[in-house]
């Protein structure tokens, strides 16, 4: 599956084109630039790791552009646009990367480069491979063609099997400071620096999420309402009500994010098939339309689960703040609160609970995140987790 990558600044020079969109990762850029220009320091398979929003994918595509195009600016732009024949990318929007998709990448990796110096295979979200899928990659990583380079991206090298880790060179990205992310968001969007700082803090340095929060006041309001709703949970009835509201909000967000794209994809497919808008779909092409709808359903499921995971990440940040206060680390500096706007409520909770109870809740939230990845029913998972919040005990 070919994937659109990132757009480079139109004013960049030929040398700077691939790296212009990479922000805050000077050491990683220096390593990859040296590898791209010096075959002696080149490795056939790389793993770029870093927290969400650190720029893993952006850096991967910049590296691909430098490898394929050298200093050919036009070719670099083709790579960054996802249209160069020597670059293949997999960006899954499903819950897992399928064996079918992995096999397609492996097959592609054995083709020699047609125009550029290398053929580059980029796999975003490599942590979404199950063991059977990972094993499909092993042979390709063990015995790659001479001019093929694999670039995998994942939050941590621990998210991949040891057999995969042993066959790649790992490059770990740094986590940017909140103040740096805030300045970047303010520069990109023109938003007030105070709003940018709050968004960067709430997003826990995730650049993409910080930008969305900074530019979407309803999203900031929903986050605040969700955290306050959880703080108000006192029993099973509250847990059921709040869980339902959270799932409903995440479902509506997922629909809003995917509806416009789904409609455009359907219209584009019908045009390709020569079917006029509103006309009946002939039986001969219904299978293609069904395949598209199946892909869109998987994407919607992934979008919903990502939204719920974001809520749970926000809850982890809130109860992390409670632990910090319980251990006297809530002031400015290293121990500053993520959810500073809720400080009075969090201080009251820190005084009412023991640290042990807060840690039980944090463990339960982490377990709920894992359960959602295993396709547990979202509403039931959240209800169970919120009962723990109310009682301090795991059901």
Image (tube, grey):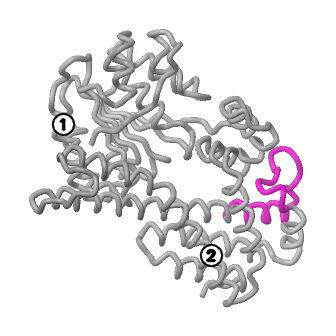
Instruction: Give percent across and percent down for residue 274.
Output: 18, 46
Instruction: Say which residue label 2 marks.
Output: 245
Disc 2, SS? helix
Instruction: Say which residue label 1 marks.
Output: 108
Using the image, determine if residue 172 lies above or below residue 101. above
Residue 120 image-quadrant placement: top left
Instruction: Give percent across and percent down for residue 8.
Output: 48, 23
Say which label, 1 or 2, has the lower sequence index: 1
Which region is colored magenta?
316-342
Residue 64 image-quadrant placement: top left
Residue occupying image coordinates x 78% and y 60%: 321
Q: Residue 109 versus residue 94: which sits nearer the camera?
A: 94
Using the image, determine if residue 27 lies above or below residue 294. above
Instruction: Give percent across and percent down for residue 319.
Output: 73, 66
Residue occupying image coordinates x 48% and y 64%: 305
Q: Residues within 10 Å of mark 1 (few under 14, many from 20)?
A: some
Q: Specify whether residue 332 is painted magenta.
A: yes
Is residue 378 left or right of 194 when viewed as pictured?
left
Q: Residue 149 versus residue 359: which sits nearer the camera?
A: 149
Residue occupying image coordinates x 43% and y 25%: 62
């Amino acid at each position: 599956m070919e994937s659109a990558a990132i757009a480079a600044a139109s004013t960049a020079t030929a040398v700077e084109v691939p790296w212009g969109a990479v922000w805050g990762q000077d050491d990683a850029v220096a390593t990859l630039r040296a590898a791209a220009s010096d075959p002696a320091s080149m490795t056939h398979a790389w793993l770029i790791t870093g927290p969400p929003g650190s720029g893993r994918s952006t850096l991967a595509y910049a590296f691909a552009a430098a490898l394929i195009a050298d200093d050919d600016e036009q070719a670099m732009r083709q790579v960054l646009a996802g249209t160069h024949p020597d670059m293949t990318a997999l960006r899954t929007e499903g819950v897992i990367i399928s064996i079918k998709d992995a096999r397609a990448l492996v097959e592609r990796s054995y083709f020699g480069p047609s125009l550029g110096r290398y053929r580059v295979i980029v796999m975003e979200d490599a942590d979404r491979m199950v063991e059977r899928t990972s094993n499909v990659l092993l042979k390709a990583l063990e015995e790659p063609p001479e001019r093929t380079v694999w670039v995998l991206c994942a939050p941590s090298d621990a998210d991949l099997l040891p057999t995969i880790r042993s066959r790649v060179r790992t490059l770990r990205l740094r986590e940017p400071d909140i103040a740096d992310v805030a300045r970047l968001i303010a520069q990109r969007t023109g938003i007030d620096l105070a709003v940018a700082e709050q968004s960067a803090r709430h997003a826990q340095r995730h650049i993409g999420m910080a930008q969305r929060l900074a530019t979407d006041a309803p999203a900031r309001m929903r986050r605040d309402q969700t955290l306050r709703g959880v703080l108000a949970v006192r029993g099973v009835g509250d847990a059921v009500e709040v869980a339902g509201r959270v799932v409903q909000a995440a479902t509506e967000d997922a629909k809003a994010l995917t509806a416009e794209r789904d409609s455009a994809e359907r219209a584009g497919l019908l045009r390709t098939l020569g079917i006029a808008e509103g006309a009946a779909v002939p039986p001969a092409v219904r299978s293609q339309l069904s395949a598209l709808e199946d892909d869109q359903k998987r994407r919607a499921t992934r979008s919903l689960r990502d939204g719920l995971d974001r809520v749970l990440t926000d809850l982890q940040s809130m109860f992390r703040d409670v632990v910090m206060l319980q251990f006297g680390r809530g002031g400015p500096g290293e121990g500053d609160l993520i959810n500073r706007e809720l400080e009075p409520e969090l201080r009251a909770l820190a005084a009412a609970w023991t640290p042990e109870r807060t840690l039980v809740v944090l463990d339960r939230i982490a377990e709920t995140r894992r359960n959602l990845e295993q396709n547990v029913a979202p509403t039931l998972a959240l209800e169970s987790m919120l009962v723990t919040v109310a009682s301090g005990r795991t059901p």
